[in-house]
């Protein structure tokens, strides 16, 4: 029993196996995954730079299903602020609605965001960093 506990502890200290796979090779989008040595409960997946193409909504749904509700899935895109980021695409007239369903109504929390804007000629920055609330600078 003690040997098993020591083996489990040493496994959890082993570095994860990290892999990166391009989604499309021309836009910088990728799926990055880290498989924990201690078992799948510590696995993490990230979708980096998905854009507003409906292909990414399908990818997010598929990967979220594979990852499951108990493991971490990160969606990393500095251009997504809200569902209005989708605008209107004549080739995907329901894109905004699908984005609302797949991303914004699906429990993904903003964990880090930086918004820059100007107020009365002054540069301002709003910063959100989990677990804290928004900060203004």
Image: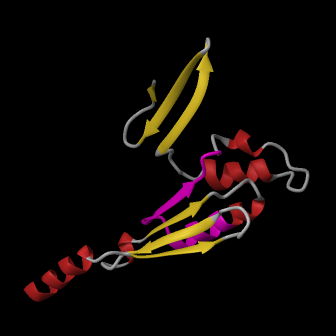
Q: Please name the residue shown 63% across and 63% down the image.
A: 60
**Which residue is at the far right?**
90
The question of residue 10 being in magenta is answered with: no
Taking depth in this image into account, of 97 and 31 the one nearest to the observer is: 31
Taking depth in this image into account, of 42 and 120 the one nearest to the observer is: 120
Judge whether 124 appears above or below 96 on screen. Answer: above
Q: How many marks?
A: 0
Residue 37 image offset from top left, x and y in percent: 33, 79
Q: Please name the residue shown 65% across and 40% down the image.
A: 82
Residue 119 image offset from top left, x and y in percent: 60, 16
Judge whether 15 appears above or below 55 on screen. Answer: below
Position of the N terminus, as image quadrant, is bottom left
Q: Please name the residue shown 67% across and 52% down the image.
A: 101
Residue 134 image offset from top left, x and y in percent: 45, 31
Q: Please name the residue shown 11% across and 88% down the image.
A: 3
Is residue 1 shown to the viewer in this render?
no
Judge whether 49 appears above or below 18 on screen. Answer: above
Position of 134 with respect to 123 (left or right) is: left
Residue 92 image offset from top left, x and y in percent: 85, 55
Position of 48 with respect to 17 (left or right) is: right
The question of residue 74 being in magenta is answered with: yes
Magenta range is 59-79
Taking depth in this image into account, of 83 and 15 the one nearest to the observer is: 15
Colour convention: secondary structure
Position of 126 with respect to 86 (left or right) is: left
Judge whether 128 appears above or below 53 on screen. Answer: above
**Which residue is at the far left?**
2
Is residue 15 shown to the viewer in this render?
yes
Taking depth in this image into account, of 17 and 86 the one nearest to the observer is: 17
**Which residue is at the far top?**
120
Q: Quadrant of residue 70?
A: bottom left
């Amino acid at each position: 029993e003690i040997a098993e506990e020591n083996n489990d502890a040493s496994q959890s200290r082993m570095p994860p196996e990290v892999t990166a796979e391009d989604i499309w090779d021309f836009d910088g989008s990728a799926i990055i995954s880290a498989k924990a040595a201690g078992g799948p409960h510590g696995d993490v997946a990230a979708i980096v730079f998905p854009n507003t193409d409906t292909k990414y909504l399908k990818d997010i749904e598929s990967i979220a299903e594979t990852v499951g509700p108990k493991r971490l899935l990160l969606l990393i895109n500095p251009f997504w602020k809200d569902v209005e980021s989708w605008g209107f695409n004549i080739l995907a007239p329901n894109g905004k609605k699908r984005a609302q369903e797949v991303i914004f109504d699906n429990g993904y929390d903003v964990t880090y965001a930086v918004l820059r804007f100007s107020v009365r000629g002054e540069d301002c920055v709003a910063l959100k960093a989990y677990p804290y609330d928004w900060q203004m600078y």
